[in-house]
Amino acid sequence: MAQTIKNNRKAVLVVEDEPLIRMMAVSLAEDEGFIVFEAQNADAAIVILEDHPDICIVFTDIHMNGSMDGLQLVALAHDRWPPLRFLIVSGEHRPTQGDIPEAPASAPSPTTARRSRARSTAWSDLARRSVEIAAAMC
């Protein structure tokens, strides 16, 4: 059964296979007042989207374990739930216009940092910017 959104809070789904990154993104989105669902791969994300039609934004990584990557998830979810909006991140490459239906927001992941603290700070900055974008999208 879908969760009822109270006080006009928006629901988002974070799809990320790295637990620490997922946890950070979830925490930041919750701090901004979103109701947040999380999935470790695209397969789990589809189940959550089926159960929670109130989700308005999917924040996804491109490279994940499972039967499909983030771009495949975006394509499938866009076909099934056209009102959804997507934030796409990648540590490997920036997707092209042709990779993404209706050109949702995308941002490169900060993977050039060698030390974990620097990488964590970069991910935190990216997640904060993404939450700001999500607030404007939904």
Image: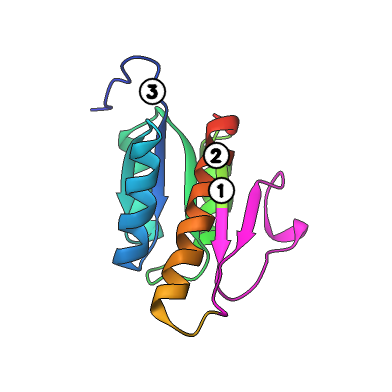
Q: Of tags 3 and 1, which is closer to the observer?
A: 1
Q: Residue at x 71, y 47 (%)?
A: 103
Residue extending farthest to the bottom is 114
Determine whether 84 is above or below 70 in the image.
above
Is 104 left, or right, of 36 in this rendering? right
Secondary element at image label 3: loop
Q: Is residue 47 visible?
A: no
- Which quarter of the rendered picture does the C terminus lie within? top right
Chief secondary structure of the magenta span? loop
Q: Amino acid at mark 2?
A: Glu
Q: Amino acid at mark 3?
A: Arg
- In the rendered structure, find residue 129 and report the number of the disc placed on it: 1
Is 70 left, or right, of 10 in this rendering? right
Provide the residue span drawn in magenta: 88-112
Q: Of tags 3 and 2, which is closer to the observer?
A: 2
Q: Are marks 1 and 2 in contact (CB under 8 Å)?
A: yes
Q: Residue at x 53, y 57 (%)?
A: 126
Crowding at dot 1, Cα within 10 Å, few <14 / some 14-19 / many 20+, comes out as few
Crowding at dot 3, Cα within 10 Å, few <14 / some 14-19 / many 20+, comes out as few
Q: Alpha-carbon distance for marks 1 and 2?
A: 5 Å
Quarter of the rendering containing residue 7: top left
Q: Amino acid at mark 1?
A: Arg
Q: Alpha-carbon distance for marks 3 and 1?
A: 19 Å
Q: Residue at x 33, y 20 (%)?
A: 5
Circle 2 sits on which residue?
Answer: 132
Circle 3 sits on which residue?
Answer: 9
Crowding at dot 2, Cα within 10 Å, few <14 / some 14-19 / many 20+, comes out as few
Q: Position of residue 40 (x, y in %)?
A: 32, 60
Determine whether 122 is above or below 23 in the image.
below
